[in-house]
Image (cartoon, helix red, strand yellow):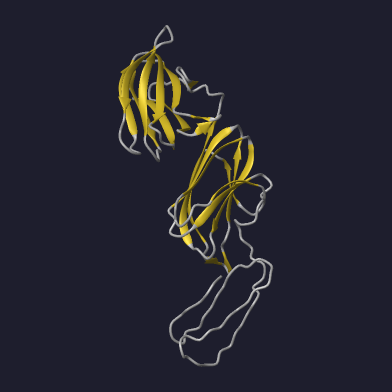
Amino acid sequence: MFESRNPGTRDEKIEQDLDPGTYYVAVRPQGSARGEYTLKIADLGVAVDPDGQPPERVNNIGLLTDYRDTDRIGFPENGYRDVNDYRKFTLDERSSVDINLTGLRANADLELIGSDGRDVLQRSAKPGNNNENINTTLDPGDYFVRVFPRGAARTPYEINMAASPIAGNIDDTPPGQPLDPLTEGGSISQRGLIGYTEGGRVDTDDYYNFTVQSSGLVTVGLDGLRANANLELFELLNNDGTRLLGSSRNPGSQDEEIQQFLDPGTYVARVFSQGNQTPYNLSVSMMVG
């Protein structure tokens, strides 16, 4: 399971967090070496991990919208080996949830766990230091995410989580989901996910409509991307049709932006994917005249 192989006559030490059971320790010479030694085995007691014992002793991030953190797993911490990092999050409505574990230098896995802290709902356990991902639709409630090392692995990591409410697919076609009215010098924003499976199909288009109350230069932006998504701006016509005013199609995960002088009326922003999955932040702002 574990070993210590220091050069020369340096002391050897193994310090690990072990589950209840029977274990064996082997002491072997290196080559033809001979010598006396003293073997010590000590029980350091039950490890108290501040983020490793659900449902109470965890990192509670509250209502999930878009969350990022860097940490490490598998290393000794305060007299024990850190083998579990739990994070608790809450959803207040049915949502599409995306969880990514990246930046691994050794093998670590990812689990999504129910409100009791024990029932594993989904697991991502790819070999080596491959990124781990869980994407699913969840009902309102409390959930836990567990990051843990495979065997003796030690690694830093980055965890990213995002939740996007599912509101009856109102945003699949124009005019889409209504946003707050846009005023001079004001701004509005909306977080979302694109390219993920919702209700048994892939969500490739998100439409949002907003009203402009006075003429001015309007900027529509798309950022927070982890993969390629594009942006279009339409005018909503009186017969409920639309007229394309501008588009932004930058490659990769680059931000998208459209600037357009708009008169009072109703307009529609479209966020769409090119076969990719990514969270995003849509923003609409108007300059002061």
Q: Is residue 258 left or right of residue 35?
A: left
Where is residue 182 drawn, in percent x and y? 42, 21
Query: Image quadrant of residue 267?
Result: top left
**Quadrant into which the C terminus falls:** top left
Query: Image quadrant of residue 257?
Result: top left
Q: Nearer the viewer, residue 39 or 282?
A: 39
Q: Nearer the viewer, residue 123 or 194?
A: 123
Where is residue 77 drawn, in percent x and y? 55, 66
Q: Is residue 263 left or right of residue 124?
A: left
Q: Nearer the viewer, residue 177 or 214?
A: 177
In this rendering, the answer to whether 265 lies above or below 128 is above
Residue drawn at x 44%, y 56% as measured from the top left: 129
Residue at the top extreme, as displayed:
239
Residue at the bottom extreme, as displayed:
35
Where is residue 286 drawn, in percent x and y? 36, 24
In this rendering, the answer to whether 271 lies above or below 102 is above
**Quadrant into which the N terminus falls:** bottom right
Where is residue 25 drawn, in percent x and y? 60, 78
Residue drawn at x 65%, y 44% as measured from the top left: 114
Q: Nearer the viewer, residue 182 or 192?
A: 192
